[in-house]
Image (cartoon, rainbow, N blue to C red):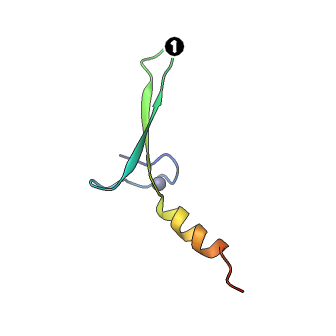
Amino acid sequence: MICVRCQQGITPGEPYEEHHHDSSSAAGCTNYSHKRCPEDEESAGSSRGDR
Ligand SMILES: [Zn+2]
């Protein structure tokens, strides 16, 4: 599975979320994303400037 937010692989056992996209013309699709992306962790840490 590939996370739609950070485009990185979601490893088995890692918490993820399913996003169902219903479409009237097609059968729809399901996207997956981390519950917390690795990039979110990094940006959250850098944005909290401790000064
Ligand atoms: Zn992700």
At 62% across and 75% down in the image, what residue appears? 46
Q: Is residue 44 above or below residue 14?
A: below
Q: Is residue 40 left or right of residue 18?
A: right
Residue 12, position as x, y percentages in the image:
27, 53
* 20, 2: nearer the viewer: 20
Quadrant assignment, res 32 = top left
Dot 1: within a 10 Å radius of its alpha carbon, few (fewer than 14), some, or many (20 or more) residues? Answer: few
Q: Nearer the viewer, residue 28 or 20?
A: 20
Residue at the extreme right: 51
Which residue does the image show at 47% across and 57% down from the upper left?
36
Q: In the figure, 9 relative to 24: above or below?
A: below
Residue 44 percent across, percent down from the top left:
59, 68
The residue lying at 72 percent from left, 86 percent from top is 51
So how many labels did they put on this image? 1
- The residue sitting at 45% across, 23% down in the picture is 28
Three-letter residue code for mark 1: Ser
Q: Residue 15's spot in the image, x, y percent?
A: 36, 53
Q: Which residue is mark 1?
A: 24
